[in-house]
């Protein structure tokens, strides 16, 4: 913001009481409040100017006042080492303050010589007296396009040394008689002016004589220009130099010869290095690499995906240039989301979607109309699934004739009757089916998974709007899907395809779709290579692989370009960003289809339950015996829903669909910086979750009914005060009330409880006074099981469920056989 550079001859300058100080000041950077009094002193010493001049000459007393004002602040440096701060010794500036004492003589006092006989000796001249207000002489430039004569500034001037070095290294010769530095070769003069005229004006603050201004009136600087042309809906971008009427060949020859100027009649156009550097950078960005030499003009046909990236380049080179209207519409819509036209979503979505979700749907709609792809990377809990379904519903709705590109009616697209495909982890297939039925019931949906799979591509093309499948199934049926022309391909939890060599990534790349949309809360987990792998799927061919053997600077260039290229096609909103649109607590149900192992085990226990109840009833068992048997069987079924290992220890961990869904949720939550409370009524399940967290190397806190009261509070304090602990495992009964855990912002109910109020109380461990973040509560439900039955009965038969879940009430419960069979019976789908 501010640098005060002191001259190398400070002791001598202080002796003369005339100290030149160079001032580097950036008015665009607001100063810290602590510097305001000192800046006021500096302003007064500079004559009250609101912005300090580049140089000022101070007396010892004035510099001493300035040192005292800035005491302790790192603003002083030596001109020879401008980046190295001078050291403070209390209120004194080392190497400076000792020369500013008032007792130091102001100037050498001339002593009158004693009268002498004979002639005066030439060696006895009186010492030169320098007035304390003697101004600094600036660098002065005279000459024409044929010669230059430059007078250096006074030796006390801070720029004296660097100016002398510049002239000496540029071929100037000193004329001792005139004390001017001369350059008399026309070619060298023009090259020098091209290379250094800007520095002479802005860095050295040189004076230019009227003679120089008169004889160099025919000199001008070439400019970097750009142009966009559109032909049959395709765009070409040209970046080059403009130098009057000079031809491209003339410019090319000048650049090839190392000549930094070109002549056009009576005009001479200088080619300054900064302009050539901007041209080289722009052409490298246009070509996608740094290897090619700078050209007088380079033209390239560009794909639609590159429009936002290149629009920024155009604005930096030629802010006043207006590209064709079609180019501007495409660029502005992705760079300013407020310019997006709303997507024609069905009326059923209008009241459901929040404002930021409407923008997300409009963004997806625009990408599809441009036949582009993107990554919807909203933070977990912000409804990526709902936005994707709203987009798909709009795509198959008659109102989709609405066109955000304002094309003529003949060019607008009809509703897209081609199928779309959603690919997701197997644990989320059922959740997608449920959400589609809930949000977009008009869509014809087919779940291609397990044994219920399509055998012919034509079936999907003719009869379905949306096909939902898993990554594993898609990889197995890759050839089937590769033969279908899809409207949209959507990949959920896209972190599964960041390994470009994986079968999942290969399968996605083989799919033909007009638009490819990835949903992930963590587009970059480990490195920018993650991003590159995702965009090989989203926009094939758009992002080029960085060449091998790059130097660090070259690698940085390619990384920066990757960020700029991908930025328009990644839409990420955090909860903090859209907090005003969110409720304090978001509740979401994740439906998990049971694995084949779970289904087999569940069906077996269900059959056993029915047989046992039939046997008990046939033997005339008491209602109490029947109730106890029912509670036992229901307990086993609920445990199978959570993890089959709770019933059969020989089962593999992969048999739990809930555990797989929890892994997905946990990974995304931790990557987004969230902290979780995980509740379950089964301590045996919490034990399995502890094993899972241990295997992942994650630290966690734990609390159940056996935790002593003292240890209980220690665990709470440890979690609250340790941001590096992402998970707290809690038994619902032991930790559902009485705890303050506002360090968490995500709650997971691994298994449902009969009373929603108890679940709400558990969630409120995080959502309570002192919480500053939006809390998201997830409930994992195993579909087609007793858990889903519990969800449906939570309100209508809460008392019945109390009897079933509360073992303490078993003896007094009033369960009929009909009620039992209603709860145990399979759910028809």
Image (cartoon, grey):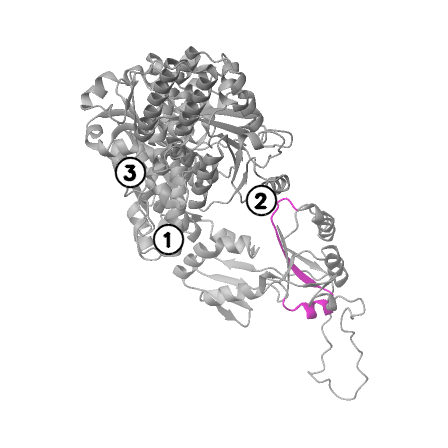
**Residue nearer the viewer, 578 or 627:** 627
Viewer can see residue 631: yes
Q: Image height check: is 585 above or below 40?
A: above
Quarter of the view holding residue 67: bottom right
Q: Which mark is residue 165?
A: none
Q: Are discs 1 and 2 less than 8 Å apart at CB?
A: no
Say whether residue 455 is left or right of residue 465: left
Q: Residues within 10 Å of mark 1 (few under 14, many from 20)?
A: some
Q: Image height check: is 439 above or below 761?
A: above
Instruction: Point out residue 365 in the picture as x, y percentages from the top left corner.
Output: 37, 23
Identify residue for label 1. Answer: 554
Q: Nearer the viewer, mark 1 or mark 2?
A: 2
Would residue 18 be counted in the magenta stretch?
yes
**Residue nearer the viewer, 575 or 723:** 723
Q: Nearer the viewer, mark 3 or mark 2?
A: 2
Magenta span of residues: 8-31
Q: Residue at x 41, y 21 (%)?
A: 786
Q: Residues within 10 Å of mark 2 (few under 14, many from 20)?
A: few
Give the spatial CA distance, label 3 vs label 1.
28 Å
Quarter of the view holding residue 112: bottom right
Q: Are discs 3 and 1 less than 8 Å apart at CB?
A: no
Identify residue for label 2. Answer: 722
Instruction: State the residue lying farthest toward the front.
Output: 619
Q: Which mark is residue 505?
A: 3
The first of marks 3 and 1 along the sequence is 3
């Amino acid at each position: 913001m501010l640098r005060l550079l002191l001259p190398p001859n400070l002791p001598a300058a202080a002796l003369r009481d005339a100290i030149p100080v160079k001032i580097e000041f950036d008015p665009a950077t607001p100063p810290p409040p602590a510097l305001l009094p000192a800046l006021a002193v500096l302003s007064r010493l500079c004559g009250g100017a609101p912005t300090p001049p580049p140089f000022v000459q101070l007396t010892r007393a004035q510099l001493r006042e300035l040192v005292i004002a800035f005491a302790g602040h790192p603003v002083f440096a030596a001109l020879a080492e401008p980046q190295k701060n001078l050291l403070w010794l209390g209120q004194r500036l080392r190497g400076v303050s000792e020369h500013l004492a008032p007792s130091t003589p102001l100037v050498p006092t001339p002593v009158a010589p004693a009268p002498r006989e004979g002639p005066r000796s030439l060696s006895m001249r009186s010492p030169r007296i320098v007035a304390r207000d003697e101004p600094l002489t600036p660098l002065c430039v005279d000459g024409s396009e044929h010669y230059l004569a430059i007078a250096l500034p006074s030796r006390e001037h801070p720029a004296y040394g660097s100016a002398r070095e510049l002239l000496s290294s540029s071929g100037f010769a000193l004329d001792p008689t005139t004390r001017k530095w001369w350059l008399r070769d026309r070619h060298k003069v023009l090259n020098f002016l091209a290379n250094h005229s800007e520095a002479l004006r802005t860095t050295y603050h040189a004076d230019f004589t009227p003679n120089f201004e008169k004889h160099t009136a025919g000199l001008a600087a070439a400019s970097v220009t750009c142009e966009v042309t559109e032909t049959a809906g395709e765009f070409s971008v040209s970046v080059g130099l403009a130098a009057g009427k000079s031809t491209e060949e003339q410019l090319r020859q000048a650049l090839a010869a190392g000549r930094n100027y070109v002549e056009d009649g009576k005009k001479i156009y200088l080619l300054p290095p900064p302009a050539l550097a901007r041209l080289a950078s722009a052409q490298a960005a246009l070509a996608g690499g740094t290897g090619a030499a700078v050209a007088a003009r380079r033209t390239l046909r560009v794909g639609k995906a590159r429009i936002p990236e290149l629009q920024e380049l155009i604005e930096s080179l030629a802010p006043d240039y207006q590209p064709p209207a079609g180019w501007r519409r495409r660029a502005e819509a992705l760079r300013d989301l407020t310019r997006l036209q709303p997507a024609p979503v069905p009326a059923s979505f209008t009241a459901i979607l929040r404002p930021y979700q409407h923008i997300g749907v409009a963004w997806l709609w625009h990408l599809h109309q441009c036949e582009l792809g993107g990554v919807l990377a909203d933070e977990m809990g912000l409804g990526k699934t709902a936005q994707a379904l709203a987009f798909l519903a709009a795509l198959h709705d008659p109102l989709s004739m609405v066109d955000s590109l304002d094309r003529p009616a003949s060019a607008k697209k009809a509703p897209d009757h081609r199928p779309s495909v959603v690919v997701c982890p197997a644990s989320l297939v059922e959740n997608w089916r449920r959400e589609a039925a809930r949000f977009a019931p008009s869509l014809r949906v087919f779940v291609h998974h397990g044994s219920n799979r399509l055998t012919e591509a034509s079936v999907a093309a003719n009869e379905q709007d949306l096909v939902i499948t898993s990554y594993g199934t898609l990889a197995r049926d890759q050839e089937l899907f590769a033969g279908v022309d899809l409207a949209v391909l959507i990949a959920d939890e896209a972190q599964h395809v960041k390994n470009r060599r994986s079968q999942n990534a290969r399968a996605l790349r083989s799919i033909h779709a007009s638009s490819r949309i990835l949903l992930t809360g963590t587009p970059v987990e480990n490195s920018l290579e993650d991003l590159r792998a995702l965009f090989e799927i989203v926009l094939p061919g758009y992002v080029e692989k960085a060449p091998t053997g790059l130097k660090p600077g070259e690698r940085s260039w390619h990384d920066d370009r990757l960020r700029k290229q991908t930025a328009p096609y990644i839409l990420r909103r955090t909860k903090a960003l859209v907090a005003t649109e969110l409720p304090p607590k978001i509740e979401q149900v994740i439906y998990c289809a049971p694995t084949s192992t779970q289904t087999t085990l569940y069906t077996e226990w269900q059959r056993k339950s029915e047989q046992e109840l039939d046997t008990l009833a046939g033997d005339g068992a008491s209602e109490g015996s029947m109730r106890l048997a029912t509670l036992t069987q229901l307990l086993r079924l609920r445990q199978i829903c959570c993890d089959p290992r709770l019933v059969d220890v020989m089962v593999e961990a992969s048999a739990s669909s809930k555990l797989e869904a929890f892994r997905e949720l946990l990974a995304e939550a931790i990557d987004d910086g969230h902290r979780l409370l995980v509740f379950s009524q089964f301590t045996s399940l919490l034990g399995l979750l502890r094993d899972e967290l241990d295997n992942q190397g994650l630290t966690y806190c734990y609390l159940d009914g056996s935790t002593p009261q003292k240890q209980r509070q220690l665990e709470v304090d440890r979690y609250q005060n340790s941001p590096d602990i992402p998970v707290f495992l809690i038994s619902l009964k032991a930790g559902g009330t009485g705890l303050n855990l506002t360090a968490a912002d995500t709650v997971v109910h691994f298994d449902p409880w009969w009373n929603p109020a108890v679940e709400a109380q558990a969630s409120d461990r995080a959502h309570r006074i002192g919480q500053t973040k939006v809390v998201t509560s997830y409930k994992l439900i195993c579909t087609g099981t007793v858990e889903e039955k519990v969800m449906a009965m939570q309100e209508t038969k809460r008392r019945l469920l109390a009897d079933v879940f509360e073992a303490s009430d078993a003896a007094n419960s009033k369960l009929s056989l009909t009620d039992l069979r209603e709860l145990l019976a399979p759910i028809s789908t």
